[in-house]
Image: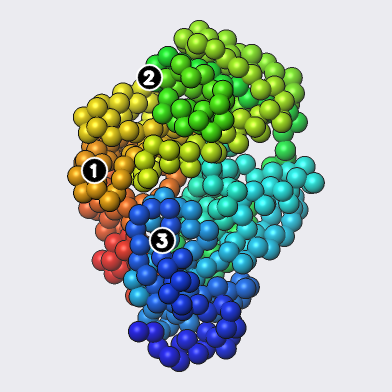
Amino acid sequence: MLPKRLKRDLRRRLGEEAVLETLEDRYVHAFDATAAVALPAIVVVPATVEELAWACEALWEAGVATTPRGAGTGYAGGAVPAAGGAVVVCDRLKVIDGPGEDVVTVEPGVVGDDLNRFLKPAGRFYPVDPASAEASTLGGHVATNAGGPRAVKYGVTRDYVLSAEVVSPGRGREVYRSDPGTPDLLSVLVGSEGTLAVFLRIRLRVTEMPEATAAAVASFAERDRAGEAANAVLEVVLPSKLEFVDHRCLACLNEQEPGAFDETAEAVLMFEFDGARAAVAEELDAAAALLRAAGALAVDVASDRKAAEALWHLRRGISPALGRLAPHKINEDVCVPLSQIPAVLNFIGELERRYDVPVPTFGHVGDGNLHVNFMYDRRRAEERERVEAAVGKLMARVVELGGTITGEHGVGLVKLPYLGLEQTEAEAAYAARIKGFFDPAGVLNPGKIYGSPGL
């Protein structure tokens, strides 16, 4: 039970509309894009950064387990609250300041695509583009160190965060910067999944919008051949995007938009180049020649920005389209060295056969990050057991291949059982000490990635 005085103070400071206690409101904020559900006791929706900081500190002072939340689009359970705790929702905090000298300052509730719409008149853009960018917030991007298709050329969120104003239970309000000669605690906070601090304002680097963009699709008769072709391209040219899509994903997209892709292909590579117009044309021609030499059945070019945007609209639709295969899915975002892409694709095929489960796979093959989707009906115990066993095998194999269990979704709740595959006891103890530094009482998004404080 939350103290009555705390609830009264929250309402007095934030307003009645910002403090939600009905069962419906609490349930809406009890889950993200995973199957995990935990009902909070209260949901707080601040309207300003000052209210956000004050509400967090009031909850922590009362010893209330608190989970920060953006749009709730995550696939790792990172925004699933502690049962009986509080959820603090950041999606009303949408102020953007800039751009000045290729820098913007944003509040955590700014949606990724909204930032780029804001930047477009200034000829600038923010390159990090997870598939959920139409809905996901920048606070969530920073919390998970989000990547996306452009990571192969432009990098991930951590590469763009210049400073952040945060509030934490152990240290109050502070600003962290990535200045040379100072301890880089900012990089520790980026990707900490809301377990160390809550982001209040984030200062981001943005860049000049490229003059030209062109994209293409290459079709392959074999999945591993597509993986080999991706490596062949990367040895010679650097696309801004290089995506892998297997035959199961293609079939779902073709059901929605007939003729969108070659129905005979076992896999396709979708790639894009951007930059100066002449350079884009040259790189596109070079990549097409490399792909044909690597065994592509066909290479179809989208030679202008509008055609390229249509192609990436299809790519963003893959995840929801997979609902045609089964009512539920486990979406894993494993990452392996580029040289091991063919090996992991072959292993995924083995898992499909051994566990009799469809495993459509797509993702950012340009930086080794694949989204492996186990499709099933979680209402059936036997299916759940098979899928859980298959997921465990995938995680173990990925680590054996020198990879990691998560490329961009984070650990959250759902990957905790596999964290020990790649994290040593000494590393876990060190992580727990970091948690204790920022959150000595363990009240901020407890039960996620970091161990118990004070170890």
Q: Is residue 228 left or right of residue 161?
A: left
Residue matched to label 2: 224
Q: Is residue 111 left or right of residue 387?
A: right
Which mark sits nearer the N-terminus, 1 or 3? 3
Distance, label 2 to label 3, CA atoms, is 36 Å
The kind of residue on which mark 1 rests is Glu
The kind of residue on which mark 3 rests is Phe
Q: Is residue 403 left or right of residue 235?
A: left
On the question of residue 325 being in view, the answer is: yes
Tell me, yes or no, whether the two marked residues, 2 and 3, touch with CB atoms within 8 Å: no
Position of residue 103 relative to residue 288, above or below, is below
- Secondary element at tag 2: helix
Q: Residue at x 60, y 17 (%)?
A: 300
x and y, in percent, of residue 455 in the image: 26, 66
**What numbered label is drawn on residue 383?**
1
Distance, label 1 to label 3, CA atoms, is 22 Å
Distance, label 2 to label 1, CA atoms, is 27 Å
Which mark sits nearer the N-terminus, 2 or 1? 2
Task: Pick the residue in front: 115 or 245.
Answer: 245
Q: Place residue 389 in its image quadrant.
A: top left
Q: Residue furthest right?
A: 121
Q: Residue at x 69, y 43 (%)?
A: 125
Tell me, yes or no, whether the two marked residues, 2 and 1, touch with CB atoms within 8 Å: no
The kind of residue on which mark 2 rests is Asp
Residue matched to label 3: 31
Mark whose residue sits in front, 2 or 3: 3
